Image: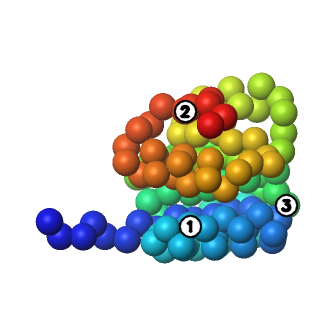
């Protein structure tokens, strides 16, 4: 069986420490990683490179994760599979993110293994958001 093509993941977060941690673990798992440090840059990279998955922070400068999701949802190809990460505790935010089509919603701080499991599930085609903390 031929090896499957390398999946590309766009990480969009303004926190350099979190960004580098996510980049390191996902690169070590064999993914190609693109990085954007604010919502505007995230949109530009997403539209230019059409990644297989986006890991998107909710609260960022220039354009929030919600505005990025709204914009990507209206593009001709539809929403790129997205995992939203956030330090926000509000259930309204989660409900809105899920309404916009995110595949998973992970609250910060999170174990990097939890992110890896979510990435693997989404890239394998499981589209239902999960709420387990394992």
* Residue 21 in view here: yes
How many numbered markers are drawn? 3
Residue drawn at 82 percent across, 65 percent down: 15
Q: Secondary structure at mark 3?
A: loop
From the top left corner, tell me how far across and down residue 61 is, in percent: 85, 61
Marks 2/1 in contact by CB < 8 Å: the verdict is no
Q: Residues within 10 Å of mark 2 (few under 14, many from 20)?
A: some
Against 90, residue 77 (above or below) is below
From the top left corner, tell me how far across and down residue 29 is, in percent: 49, 68
From the top left corner, tell me how far across and down residue 99 is, in percent: 60, 29
**Residue occupied by mark 2:** 129
Left or right: where 90 falls relative to 23: right
Closest to the camera, between mark 2 and mark 1, is 1
Extreme residue toward the left, this view: 1
From the top left corner, tell me how far across and down residue 129 is, in percent: 55, 32
Q: Residues within 10 Å of mark 3 (few under 14, many from 20)?
A: few
Residue drawn at 72 percent across, 72 percent down: 20
**Residue occupied by mark 3:** 61
Against 26, residue 134 (above or below) is above
**Residue occupied by mark 1:** 26
Q: Nearer the viewer, residue 1 or 65?
A: 1
Left or right: where 18 falls relative to 9: right
Extreme residue toward the front, this view: 134
């Amino acid at each position: 069986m031929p090896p499957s093509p390398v999946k590309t993941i766009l990480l969009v977060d303004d926190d350099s420490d979190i960004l580098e941690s996510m980049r390191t673990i996902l690169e070590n798992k064999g993914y190609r990683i693109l990085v954007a440090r604010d919502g505007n840059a995230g949109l530009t990279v997403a539209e230019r490179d059409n990644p297989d998955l986006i890991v998107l922070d909710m609260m960022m400068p220039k354009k929030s994760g919600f505005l990025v999701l709204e914009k990507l949802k209206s593009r001709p190809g539809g929403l790129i599979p997205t995992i939203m990460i956030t330090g926000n505790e509000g259930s309204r935010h989660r409900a809105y993110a899920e309404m916009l089509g995110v595949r998973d919603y992970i609250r910060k701080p999170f174990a990097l293994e939890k992110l890896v499991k979510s990435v693997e599930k989404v890239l394998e085609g499981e589209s239902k958001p999960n709420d387990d903390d394992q």
